[in-house]
Image (tube, rainbow, N blue to C red):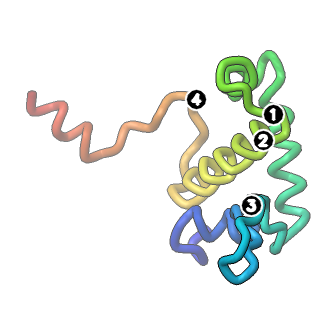
Amino acid sequence: PHAYQSSRQILTLAGLQLVTSDKSGLRQGTVRLSKRGKPQLRRYAYMFAMRHVRKDGIYHAEFERMVKEQRRPKKEAIVILERKALRMLYSIARERRDYTPEHPVHKKSCAEGSRV
């Protein structure tokens, strides 16, 4: 993870960046995934997202909200969660910390909280 400067580079490596196919400004193309990059990383991100969309998964409530309330297609919701999972896994690996479902408390905010 230290070979990359941001999670955006990981998403590019996986091929999960959004691209449009425009034809010299004459027509507006459709938005799709680039699919350039490592297919195995995409596969693992997909399997991770599918596993955590189940009833006992960490993304279940968010997936249900996207599909039912926001009326997103299921495939689009899965891709959104894949991207979110890769960013989360990148930050965990970069900071060399254990996964916790709660947001991590940063040292800076702890120091400020102790003064109050």
Q: Nearer the viewer, residue 84 or 90?
A: 84
Q: Amino acid at mark 4?
A: Pro
Query: Left or right: 69 with respect to 108?
Result: right
**Residue depth check, mark 2 versus mark 3: number of the one nearer the observer:** 2
- Above or below, comparing residue 33 to residue 81 in the picture: below
Residue located at (30% from left, 45% from top):
107
Q: Are marks 2 and 3 in contact (CB under 8 Å)?
A: no
| N-terminal label among 3 and 4 | 3
Mark 1 → mark 4, Cα distance in angstroms: 26 Å
Q: Are marks 4 and 2 in contact (CB under 8 Å)?
A: no
Q: Which x, y percent locates residue 104?
A: 44, 38
> How many circles with numbers are drawn on the protein?
4
Name the residue tied to disc 4: 101
**Residue depth check, mark 3 versus mark 1: number of the one nearer the observer:** 1
Name the residue tied to disc 3: 16
Name the residue tied to disc 1: 73
Name the residue tied to disc 2: 76
Task: Look at the numbered disc 3 and give the secondary structure of its residue.
Answer: loop
| N-terminal label among 2 and 3 | 3
